[in-house]
Amino acid sequence: MKYDLTYCNLCPRKCNADRTKSAGVCKSGVLPRVARSALHFWEEPCISGSGSGKKGSGTVFFSGCPLKCIFCQNEKISHENAGADITAERLSEIFMELEEEGACNINLVTPTHWACVITEALDIYRPGIPVLYNCGGYESVETLKMLEGYIDVWLPDIKYADPVLAEHFSKAADYPDVAFKAVREMLRQAGNPVLDSNGIIRKGVIIRHMVLPLHVKDSERVMDRIAEEFGTGVWMSLLFQYTPVIKSEKYPELNRTLTMRERKRAEDYLERKGFRNGYIQEPGNTDASFIPDFDLTGVKKIPRT
């Protein structure tokens, strides 16, 4: 599917950038920039295939991002834009290579600003495994509708309920309303998850929320709004993996990981609200070693014999 990048409005920033001449808010031009393509084993069990005999999720980490969260765990690619430019044709080959390695799915990480190129690549080669859209939740409904039929599984974050907090950490006061509208569209397209006989997700929506230090109250408000708008039958993944990648005097509460008290408070609230489907992240995932190396693994074309 072709899209005119001379007047780009793929994301809610609607910066109208002519990406053929200069980068938009996402720091991206015309060719997709990818920092890593490899099997990944640290997603939710139904994505990575833990215990199913599968080999992991086939992740493609895109560089750049329209949502500039100050606490991003992948800041090397989202903020610094590390990676290599490739073509839609090469991206389609990466999908094929990950599938041949035995991936459970194709996991598109931070894909928002490359949605048009992703559809081009999927038109060239459509994998026989599910395609996942792993995003920050700051999505344009128009772009999501453009992706209908291309994406099997949606993995959106809902980061904030408070517009003030969203502005403070992500320069996006409109984030809560935008994210909830986006998730509503994702649910319209895919509904709740459907798993195969091995427990691997085939289609559906899983809403992720990462609890931030000193902001459990906002996490509770996120859960309140999810329950109110979508019901407690939706699938949620409550994450406690926050790692302070960058130390900052401006954001002192983000210079530490969560306390056990914060974790328990969020977990207890999820249970009291009556959410019955999804995942609660186990302790021990707050080390920087869980952040992948964005070293261009899998990006360079593999010679075929």
Image (tube, grey):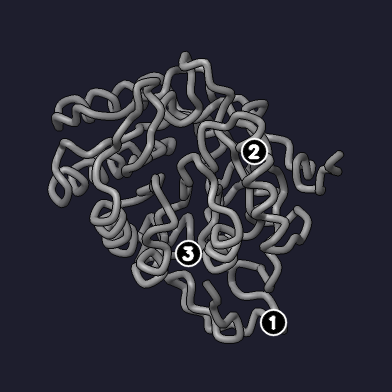
- Identify residue type, mark 2: Leu
Image quadrant of residue 183?
A: bottom left
Q: Earlier in the sequence, mark 1 or mark 2?
A: 1
**Label 3 vs label 1: CA separation?**
25 Å
Residue at x-position 28% and y-position 60%: 185
Q: Nearer the viewer, residue 9 or 261?
A: 9
- The residue labelled by disc 1 is 20
**SS at mark 1 in the image:** loop
Residue at x-position 56% and y-position 37%: 255
Image quadrant of residue 235?
A: top left
**Direction front: furthest residue:** 305
**Residue 196 against residue 85 in the figure, above or below:** above
- The residue labelled by disc 3 is 171
Q: Nearer the viewer, residue 1 or 278?
A: 1
In the displayed structure, does residue 89 sit left or right of residue 260?
right
- Mark 1 touching mark 2, by CB under 8 A? no
Residue 71 appears at what percent x and percent y?
55, 46
Circle number at residue 98: 2
**Residue 203 against residue 102 in the figure, above or below:** below
Residue at x-position 33% and y-position 64%: 178
- Identify residue type, mark 1: Thr
| Image quarter of the C terminus | top right
**SS at mark 3 in the image:** loop
- Identify residue type, mark 3: Lys
Q: Earlier in the sequence, mark 2 or mark 3?
A: 2
Residue 176 appears at what percent x and percent y?
31, 58
**Residue 288 against residue 212 in the figure, above or below:** above
Residue 73 seen in the figure = yes
Numbered marks: total: 3
**Label 1 vs label 2: CA separation?**
29 Å
Residue 63 appears at what percent x and percent y?
66, 56
